[in-house]
């Protein structure tokens, strides 16, 4: 059983971490600026599912095995990095596409964002490293460790997803205003593409945590 004081400390820390701007927030903001609110929300839901994949893997011990293997870590991070770069290239090529207000191609865009969110987050070994470094600090070793890990990890994912959704709504308002100025919207989409490529390069350069 998780100690109430430890749980409150966990919630405080998780809220601070969720609200701290990082690659996840940049990712959903960039996708929203490029494709609109529904694409951004689909992407946010997808990253949430991808986060839960790491929670389940961490509870099962899979993430620890991946992080312990330099080859597995490298393969996973390069796959995620290449996917991010591919998304950036795709957005750049579509930057000049005419957009209807307030969004264009809502259903396909939402599905694309959802899929990309799952893949990018699930292939990010840094997320696995975060859960394995952060969650165990608040787990009672005398209790059901795996169950506690899943509970705390799920709460962390929900908080991150909620913050990402707020970022999406903000970015969508920016995009809707820019959509009345096609040149500005094109620049925003190209900036979003550059952000995707930058995130991919940053992931490719990530080092395996010391074991």
Image: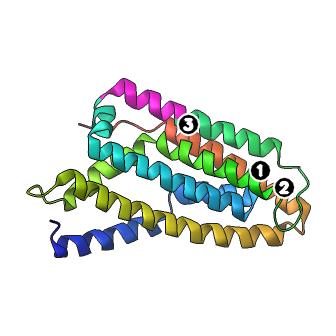
Q: Position of residue 37 (x, y in %)?
A: 71, 65
Q: Nearer the viewer, residue 113 or 107?
A: 107
Instruction: Provide the residue designation for mark 3.
Output: 81
Q: Residues within 10 Å of mark 2 (few under 14, many from 20)?
A: many
The reply to whether the C-beta atoms of the residues labelled 2 and 1 are less than 8 Å apart is yes
Separation (CA) of disc 3 from disc 2: 24 Å
The reply to whether the C-beta atoms of the residues labelled 1 and 3 are less than 8 Å apart is no
Instruction: Provide the residue designation for mark 1.
Output: 190
Task: Report the span colored magenta.
Answer: 69-79
- For image coordinates 61% across by 36% down, the residue present is 83
Q: Position of residue 82 (x, y in %)?
A: 59, 33
Instruction: Provide the residue designation for mark 2.
Output: 186
Task: Please identify the quarter of the rendering in which residue 209 is found.
Answer: top left
Q: Indicate whether 75 appears above or below 207.
A: above
Quadrant in which the N terminus appears: bottom left
> 177 left or right of 59?
right
Q: Position of residue 204 (x, y in %)?
A: 51, 35
Q: Nearer the viewer, residue 141 or 198?
A: 141
State which tag comes first along the sequence, 1 or 3.
Answer: 3
Q: Indicate whether 15 appears above or below 119.
A: below
- For image coordinates 36% across by 65% down, the residue present is 155
Q: Indicate whether 1 appears above or below 124.
A: below
- For image coordinates 22% across by 51% down, the residue present is 146
Separation (CA) of disc 1 from disc 3: 18 Å
Marker disc for residue 84: none
């Amino acid at each position: 059983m998780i100690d109430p004081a430890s749980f409150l400390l966990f919630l405080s820390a998780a809220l601070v971490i969720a609200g701290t701007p990082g690659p996840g927030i940049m990712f959903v903001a960039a996708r929203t600026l490029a494709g609109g609110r529904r694409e951004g929300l689909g992407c946010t839901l997808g990253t949430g599912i991808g986060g839960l994949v790491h929670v389940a893997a961490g509870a099962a011990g899979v993430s620890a095995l991946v992080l312990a293997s330099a080859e597995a870590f490298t393969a996973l991070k390069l796959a995620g990095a290449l996917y991010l770069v591919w998304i950036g290239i795709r957005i750049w090529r579509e930057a000049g596409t005419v957009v209807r207000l307030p969004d264009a191609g809502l259903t396909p865009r939402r599905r694309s964002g959802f899929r990309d969110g799952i893949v990018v987050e699930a292939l990010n070994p840094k997320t696995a490293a975060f859960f394995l470094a952060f969650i165990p600090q608040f787990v009672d070793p005398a209790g059901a460790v795996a169950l506690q890990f899943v509970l705390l990890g799920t709460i962390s994912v929900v908080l991150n997803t909620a913050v990402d959704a707020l970022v999406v709504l903000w970015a969508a308002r920016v995009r809707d205003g820019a959509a009345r100025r096609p040149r500005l919207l094109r620049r925003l989409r190209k900036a979003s593409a550059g952000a995707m490529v930058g995130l991919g390069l940053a992931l490719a350069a990530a080092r395996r945590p010391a074991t």
